[in-house]
């Protein structure tokens, strides 16, 4: 029975439709795995076993009648950033401990519409602010992968670390995640999984706990590129409840998977060859180029001159938006309220000091500073202008390339606790991913190989706005060439 | 534009985050580290560039100005730290 948990989302959905097994069997297999593995991995912050079994039985009834949606009976994990009606949603923060939304996020509502089963809520960095899952109020998630040379526990990345760890260790068929600066793609790269951030506006932000609204975008973490295409389609929709939601049809991206990439022009940006990039990452990138060349792509050297300014611009824009978004946590209507206080202002300040962790407080302080009188133009407006320069860099190359290939991360997964000393070192994790958030473009991370120390490494494909089709097409070609089948050796 | 402890105290107040006195100096140093790194943005020529506030190339939608939701008092109050008789209960702030 436990073999069922190793299935891809596609094979599971097909098996359920063919009645090879039932959703209840599949769901029970995952619940058994979670019970055995979660104490060590800490991927789930809450397991909703009763709800899962109830949904599974309902799916089985529909499947028995030959009915059912695109995800009918498929057990998924949900990042604890998506509001789920009647199920605690914390965004990894003590501020929201005990918060039970009376409504459902649009993304998860779409999944239940399509018949998916919810196994539980997945751990994450607090309010999605982090790259190692160490800022979670529920403790860090462990990466199922370990290096050959060491027994040390590694980070699965962040902020969607619970999603990545759960998918990599077969604790769900696939998971929802979200990406503000790389929070889907970096954890996917660290765990040998696939993660895509679609074009900004494809997936509704309604019911997603907000971090930085102009950058936040939902997407899936899955075992294969096909699975990502299936799950992303279900997640995306036009939603009147999100003012930035795009009123456009969602294509069937599975059609793009397996299509020949012959003749596609792939850009390789010189600026992504950053100082101090390891030989290993360079080699992986060159390997990716070689694979696509062999598949018939034309490789084009391109320049995205403002790349190095993306991270510093991000660390103004994202904290600024966060400081505004998180102002809602005042201890009055929901969230944590301090017991002891001397005045109204003190009550706000005490509630927020008790409810928010250190990294969130740091970013809110930066955000408040760059928006404060006298600094607004020098920092915030300046960053927004640089943001446009970064977006223009991409606009200028789309005439000569169809997609761009880069590494997903500058390193493989690192030890938990390793980069906590200096926030700047931690921020560098997002150096290759953050540009697409600023420009609103789709980006996918595909597992492409193992480091010399036996850890997964990912390649990123960036596409034009709304051209996820080409992104999936190129990603599938890379997946096919890489033939990545490695699995973490079970230690948990 | 180096940040000192007094600036951190002011910003922490603006952000409504209670910060103990002995944290002000370490926080100032951390923030200076981050802001010094951010200073590199000054190298970019942004003459005549419009600030980019959104990456959605469409105007915000308008809708009819009508009530579309409501009458959910219990749901709205369901996560309140304290409520009574259909109201949020907050500490007394005016004597």
Image: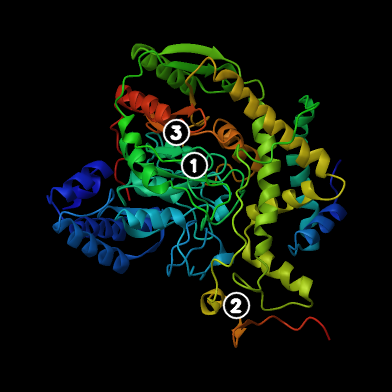
Q: Position of residue A387 (x, y in %)?
A: 68, 33
Of the two numbered discs 3 and 1 on the same chain, state the one appearing first in sequence. 1
Q: How many marks?
A: 3
Both labels 3 and 1 in a single chain? yes
In contact (CB < 8 Å): disc 2 and disc 1: no
Left or right of A6? Residue A356 is right
The circle drawn on residue A415 is 1
Q: In terms of depth relative to the viewer, which is nearer, B90 or A65?
A: A65
Q: Position of residue A208 (x, y in %)?
A: 52, 55
Mark 1, other Cα within 10 Å: few <14 / some 14–19 / many ≥20: some
Q: Nearer the viewer, mark 3 or mark 1?
A: 3
Q: CA distance from mark 3 to mark 2?
A: 41 Å
Q: In terms of depth relative to the viewer, which is nearer, A251 or A168?
A: A251
The subunit letter for the residue under badge 2 reads B
Left or right of A290? Residue B13 is right
Q: Position of residue A112 (x, y in %)?
A: 34, 57
The image shows residue A107, relative to residue A459, as above or below, that is below
Both labels 2 and 1 in a single chain? no
The image shows residue B19, relative to residue A79, as above or below, that is below
The circle drawn on residue B81 is 2
Residue drawn 68% across the image and 64% down it: A353
The circle drawn on residue A444 is 3
């Amino acid at each position: 029975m436990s073999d069922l948990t190793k299935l891809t989302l596609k094979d599971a959905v097909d098996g359920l439709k063919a009645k090879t097994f039932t959703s209840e069997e599949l769901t029970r297999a995952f619940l058994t795995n979670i019970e055995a593995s979660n104490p060590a991995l800490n991927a789930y912050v809450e397991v909703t076993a009763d709800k899962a079994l109830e949904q599974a039985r309902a799916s089985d009834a529909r499947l028995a009648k030959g009915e059912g949606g695109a995800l009918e009976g498929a057990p998924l994990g949900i990042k604890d950033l998506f509001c789920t009606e009647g199920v605690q949603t914390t965004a990894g923060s003590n501020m929201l401990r005990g918060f039970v939304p009376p409504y459902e996020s649009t993304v998860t509502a779409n999944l239940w519409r399509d018949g998916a089963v919810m196994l539980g809520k997945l751990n994450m960095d607090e309010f999605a602010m982090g790259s190692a899952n160490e800022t979670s109020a529920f403790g860090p998630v462990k990466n199922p992968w370990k290096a050959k040379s060491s027994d040390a526990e590694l980070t699965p990345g962040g902020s969607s670390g619970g999603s990545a760890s759960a998918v990599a260790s077969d604790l769900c068929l696939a998971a929802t995640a979200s990406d503000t600066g790389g929070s889907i793609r970096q954890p996917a790269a660290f765990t040998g999984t696939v993660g895509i951030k679609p074009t900004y506006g494809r997936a509704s932000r309604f019911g997603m706990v907000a971090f930085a609204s102009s950058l936040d975008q939902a997407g899936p973490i899955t075992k294969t590129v096909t699975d990502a295409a299936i799950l992303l389609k279900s997640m995306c929709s036009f939603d009147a409840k999100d003012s930035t939601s795009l009123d456009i049809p969602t294509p069937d991206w599975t059609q793009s998977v397996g299509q020949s990439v012959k003749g596609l022009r792939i850009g390789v940006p010189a600026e992504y060859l950053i100082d101090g990039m390891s030989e290993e990452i360079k080699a992986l990138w060159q390997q990716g180029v070689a694979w696509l060349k062999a598949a018939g792509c034309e490789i084009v050297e391109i320049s995205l001159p403002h790349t190095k300014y993306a991270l510093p611009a991000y660390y103004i824009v994202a904290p600024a938006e966060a400081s505004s978004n998180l102002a809602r946590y005042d201890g009055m209507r929901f969230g944590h309220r301090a017991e002891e206080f001397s005045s109204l202002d003190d009550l706000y300040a005490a509630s927020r000091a008790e409810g928010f962790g250190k990294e969130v407080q740091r970013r809110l302080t930066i955000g408040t500073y760059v928006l404060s009188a006298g600094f607004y133009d020098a920092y915030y407006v300046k960053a927004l202008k640089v943001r446009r320069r970064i977006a223009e860099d991409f606009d200028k190359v789309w005439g000569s390339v169809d997609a761009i290939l880069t590494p997903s991360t500058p390193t493989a997964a690192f030890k938990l606790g390793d980069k906590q000393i200096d926030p700047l070192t931690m921020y560098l994790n997002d150096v290759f991913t953050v540009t697409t958030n600023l420009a609103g473009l789709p980006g996918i991370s595909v597992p492409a190989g193992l480091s010399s120390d036996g850890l997964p490494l990912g390649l990123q494909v960036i596409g034009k706005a709304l051209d996820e089709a080409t992104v999936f097409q190129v990603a599938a070609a890379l997946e096919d060439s890489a033939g990545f089948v490695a699995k973490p050796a079970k230690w948990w | 534009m180096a940040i000192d402890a007094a600036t951190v105290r002011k910003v922490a107040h603006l952000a409504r985050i209670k910060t103990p006195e002995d944290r002000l100096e370490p926080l100032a140093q951390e923030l200076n580290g981050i802001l010094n790194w951010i200073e590199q943005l000054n190298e970019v020529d942004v003459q005549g560039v419009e600030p980019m506030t959104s990456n959605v190339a469409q105007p915000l939608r308008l809708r009819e100005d009508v009530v579309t939701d409501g009458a959910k008092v219990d749901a709205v109050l369901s996560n309140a730290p304290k409520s009574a008789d259909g109201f949020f209960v907050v500490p007394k702030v005016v004597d």
